[in-house]
């Protein structure tokens, strides 16, 4: 079946959140649990975050892969800028990631495909879109964080020109699906 790539719209927020949960190895669930009102479903928290506009975590920074009107994948990316006035990250689970940033890159925070759509070249097409967007924005390249435990994704990114430039130790938490190291990767 043919797959079309398109900019996300507000109505995609729930699909984006669902796919973000797949790709984040529990990190999104952890973050959203900190934001949830009592009794609020995590997927609802994520959907409300991606329904916003004018912020990094918005549908406006998502590219959708769609087949016959059904969302089959998405990539969320935004411009990583150095903010000298940023408040230090104090959450013990998230703090190790705070230094894993490369300013002036297009940061890919999520690239996710539903299981039946993997291995069909869609990830490569998402990366091509990301490279084109980074070039259009005058950025120095792409960056992302992946986990040592996610060997398939690491091989994919390395095959497509990413290299590991830094790492941190993951702080164990019951909501996280990985332990070990997280890697900051950069292209080129």
Image (cartoon, helix red, strand yellow):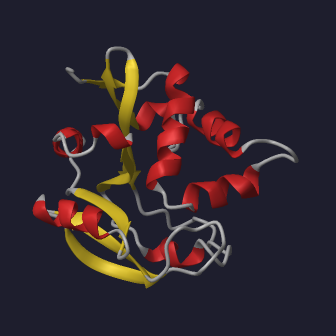
- The part of the image, by quadrant, that contains residue 136 is top left
At x 33%, y 72%, the residue is 184
Task: Give the vertical position of 126 relative to 2 (above or below).
Answer: below
Q: Position of residue 37 (x, y in %)?
A: 84, 46
Q: Residue furthest right?
A: 38
Q: Where is residue 43 in the image (x, y as percent from the top left)?
A: 65, 40
At x 36%, y 36%, the residue is 73
- In screen coordinates, is 89 left or right of 184? right
- In screen coordinates, is 88 left or right of 180? right
- In screen coordinates, is 12 left or right of 132? right
Q: Position of residue 118 (x, y in %)?
A: 27, 44
Task: Give the vertical position of 110 relative to 49 (above or below).
Answer: below
- The part of the image, by quadrant, that contains residue 31 is bottom right
Is residue 151 visible to us here?
yes
Task: Give the vertical position of 175 relative to 170 (above or below).
Answer: above
At x 64%, y 66%, the residue is 175
Residue 166 vs residue 140, the one in the foreground: 166
Is residue 53 visible to us here?
no
């Amino acid at each position: 079946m043919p797959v079309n790539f398109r900019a996300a719209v507000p109505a995609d927020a729930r699909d984006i959140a669902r796919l973000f949960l797949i790709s984040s190895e529990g990190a999104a669930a952890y973050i959203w649990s900190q934001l949830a009102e009592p009794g609020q479903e995590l997927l609802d928290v994520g959907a409300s975050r991606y329904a916003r506009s004018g912020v990094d975590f918005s549908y406006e920074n998502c590219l959708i892969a769609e087949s016959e009107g059904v969302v089959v994948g998405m990539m969320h990316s935004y411009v990583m800028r150095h903010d000298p006035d940023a408040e230090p990250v104090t959450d013990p689970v998230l703090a190790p990631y705070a230094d894993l940033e490369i300013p002036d890159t297009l940061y890919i925070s999520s690239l996710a495909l539903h299981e039946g759509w993997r291995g069909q070249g869609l990830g490569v097409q998402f990366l091509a879109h990301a490279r084109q967007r980074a070039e259009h924005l005058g950025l120095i390249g792409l960056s992302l964080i992946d986990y040592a435990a996610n060997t398939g994704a690491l091989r994919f990114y390395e095959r497509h020109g990413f290299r590991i430039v830094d790492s941190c130790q993951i702080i164990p938490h019951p909501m996280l699906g990985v332990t070990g190291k997280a890697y900051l990767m950069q292209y080129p």
